[in-house]
Image (cartoon, helix red, strand yellow):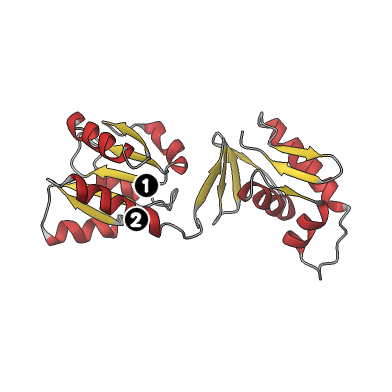
Amino acid sequence: MAHILAIDDDEAMLILIRNTLTKDGHVVTGISRITETLGNELSSYDLILLDVMMPGTDGYTFCREIRSFTDCPILFLTAKSMEEDVDFGFSVGADDYIKKPFSILELRARVNAHLRREQREKIQCFAVGSVRFFLAQKEIRVREQKLIFTKSEYEISLLLARNHGQIYSKEQIFENVFGYDKESDVSAITEHIKNIRKKLAAAGISPIETIWGIGYRWNNV
């Protein structure tokens, strides 16, 4: 199952997309216009279907603006067929085109093909609940509030969040973050976790749970 965002100003097209892709078990969110707050939600989607010609912000502009925030496949829905339009779409970050009118079979096949290929590690951004990790910048944000972490705090948070729901002992955290050869001490993990929790609590969340006698687990909040 994938969470798919479809943006098209044609309500009939949104209904067609939703009815088609939900039959494959996907969750489809359909919207008819691009809003200013939409960028904050992008990391929760696995694939985006984006109409090119829309009132206000067009698909090309939106794709260019969001490409640094999400790695998910972006497929343009367009009636345009000229080669230069296709080339321009790829230049602003699109992964593929589906030209209108298209068949239900083509839509399902193209979407599912991209989802199957989407096994690459996220290199820009990913989210766990309300916490967003910007990997290139090594930043953590909670509801757009940037949190200041040390390098060690960031790496520990990243490890736990990427594997949310999994329990890590202090020894496992130390090994994964610092390696065997680092001049540090496993006991320092406790202090790092304490500092991370304090900073997250200041942002109004407490995702790290202590599993007494075992270790720590990051929960989706």
- The residue that label 2 is drawn on is 114
Q: Nearer the viewer, residue 32 or 167?
A: 167
Q: Quadrant of residue 53?
A: top left
Q: Label 1: few (<14), some or many (≥20) within 10 Å?
A: many
| Outermost residue toward the bottom in this view | 181
Which mark sits nearer the N-terminus, 2 or 1?
Answer: 1
Q: Whole-Å distance between the Cαs marked 2 and 1? A: 8 Å
Would residue 94 appear left or right of 13 to someone viewing this image? right
How far across and how far down the image is residue 99, in percent?
Answer: 16, 50
Which image quadrant for residue 221? Answer: top right
Q: Residue at x 40, y 51 (%)?
A: 72
Q: How many marks?
A: 2
Whether residues under marks 2 and 1 lie with C-beta atoms below 8 angstroms apart, the answer is yes
Q: Is residue 45 left or right of residue 78?
A: right
- Residue labelled with disc 1: 47
Q: Tag 2's secondary structure? A: helix
At 26% from the left and 53% from the top, the residue drawn is: 109
Q: Residues within 10 Å of mark 2 (few under 14, many from 20)?
A: some
Image vertical order of residue 155 relative to residue 36, above or below: below
Q: Position of residue 76 (x, y in %)?
A: 24, 49
Q: Secondary structure at mark 1?
A: strand
| In this rendering, position of residue 181 left or right of residue 217 | right
Q: Nearer the viewer, residue 211 or 93?
A: 211
Query: Amino acid type of disc 2?
Result: His
Amino acid tagged 1: Leu
User: Residue 149: image x %, image y %?
Assistant: 70, 47
Q: Residue at x 26, y 48 (%)?
A: 108
